[in-house]
Image (cartoon, rainbow, N blue to C red):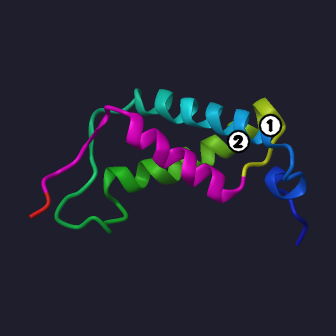
């Protein structure tokens, strides 16, 4: 298996990695605007058909393609995941149910 991720190929290019990650966060926040408010927890937070879980899968795939097209950069799954959840934390589109 060949190493594809830019972070692994050139770990010292921190300026590029930071720029791509900042853009990925913006990308996710902009995509969230296309959706109604989404609840983060419900009766079963592990329901893979829940809107949040479906949204995650779709946006991860689209963000990976976006990175490759715009930046000619292959983001690692960890980078995509971290940027996604940073964006969730900054977005106003997500509503958290009270945990009881």
**In the image, residue 68 lies at what x, y percent?**
78, 40
Q: In this view, does 87 lie to the left or right of 43?
A: right
* Residue 63 in magenta stretch: no
Which quadrant would the C terminus be assigned to in this image?
bottom left
Image x and y of residue 49, in percent? 34, 60
User: Where 29 sits versus 1, above or below?
Assistant: above
- As drawn, the label of residue 65 is 2
Residue at the bottom extreme of this rendering: 1
Report crowding for label 1: few under 14, some 14 to 19, many 20 or more residues within 10 A (C-alpha).
some
**Residue for point 52% across, 36% down:** 28
Number of numbered discs: 2
Residue 59 locus on image (x, y percent): 53, 44
Left or right: where 98 falls relative to 24: left
Residue at x-position 91% and y-position 67%: 2
Q: Quadrant of residue 67?
A: top right
8 with respect to 57 (left or right): right
In the displayed structure image, the side of residue 54 where residue 22 appears, left or right: right
Q: Which mark is residue 16?
A: 1
Tell me if residue 22 comes above or below residue 50 in the rendering: above
Residue positioned 87% across, 63% down in the render: 3
Query: What secondary structure do most residues of the magenta stretch adopt?
Result: helix
- The part of the chain drawn in magenta is 76-98
Figure quadrant of the N terminus: bottom right
Q: In terms of secondary structure, where does tag 1 sit?
A: helix
Dot label at residue 58 = none
Along the viewing direction, whichever of 90 and 53 lies nearer the viewer = 90
């Amino acid at each position: 298996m060949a190493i594809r991720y830019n972070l692994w190929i050139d770990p010292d290019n921190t300026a590029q990695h930071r720029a791509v990650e900042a853009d990925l966060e913006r990308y996710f926040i902009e995509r969230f605007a296309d959706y109604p408010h989404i609840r983060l927890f419900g009766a079963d937070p592990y329901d893979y058909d829940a809107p949040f879980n479906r949204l995650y899968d779709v946006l991860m795939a689209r963000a990976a393609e976006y990175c490759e097209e715009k930046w000619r950069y292959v983001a690692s799954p960890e980078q995509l995941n971290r940027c996604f959840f940073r964006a969730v934390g900054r977005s106003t589109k997500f509503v958290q149910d009270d945990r009881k």
